[in-house]
Image (tube, rainbow, N blue to C red):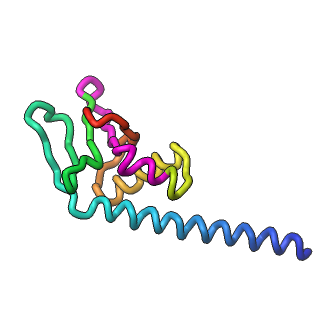
């Protein structure tokens, strides 16, 4: 193996390790968001579960009333979604995939569709 090929292989390994560390950091940050969340269900919107902490709604679990099989996991854009974009520099699909895996792992919810919401009124 030539030196150039060895260097390329090492660069790939470094990138893989960086990605692993980044994923661990994202997971720790996400877990910190989940820590201390309070659940709220309002009588006027029984199909929405609000996940709140310190007066802020971080997540909303929405059961679609028309298509009962669809469950959405909305993440506040400013408090959650934008952090993945800015701090971790990942795109929409990568964020969605990561959040789906975290929701399944820590909230034991599978098959949810995660997305961001921007407005404060839902």
Give the answer, above or below, for where 19 lies relative to 65.
below
Q: Nearer the viewer, residue 35 or 63?
A: 35
- Image x and y of residue 68, in percent: 26, 30
Is 106 on the left-hand or right-hand side of 47? right
Magenta-span inclusion, residue 2: no
Which residue is rendered at x = 21% and y = 55% of the image?
53
- Image x and y of residue 50, in percent: 21, 44
Which residue is rendered at x = 61% and y = 71% of the image?
17
Which residue is rendered at x = 29% and y = 49% of the image?
58
Q: Nearer the viewer, residue 53 or 34?
A: 53
Is 57 on the left-hand or right-hand side of 86? left
Give the answer, above or below, for where 39 lies relative to 26.
above
In the picture, the quarter occupied by the C terminus is top left
Number of marks present in the image shown: 0
Which residue is rendered at x = 37% and y = 37% of the image?
118
Is 113 on the left-hand or right-hand side of 6? left
In the picture, the quarter occupied by the N terminus is bottom right
Outermost residue toward the top?
Answer: 66
- Image x and y of residue 15, in percent: 66, 66
**Range shown magenta:** 65-84
Outermost residue toward the left?
Answer: 43
Is 74 on the left-hand or right-hand side of 27? left
């Amino acid at each position: 193996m030539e030196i150039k090929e060895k260097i390329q292989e090492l660069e790939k390994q470094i990138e893989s390790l960086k990605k692993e560390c980044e994923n661990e950091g994202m997971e720790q940050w996400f877990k910190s968001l989940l820590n201390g969340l309070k659940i709220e269900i309002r009588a006027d919107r029984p199909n929405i579960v609000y996940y709140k902490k310190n007066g802020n709604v971080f997540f909303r679990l929405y059961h679609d009333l028309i298509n009962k099989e669809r469950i959405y996991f909305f993440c506040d854009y400013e408090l959650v979604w934008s952090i993945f974009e800015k701090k971790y520099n990942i795109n929409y699909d990568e964020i969605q995939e990561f959040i789906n895996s975290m929701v399944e792992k820590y909230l034991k919810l599978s098959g949810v569709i995660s997305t961001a919401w921007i407005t404060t009124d839902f």
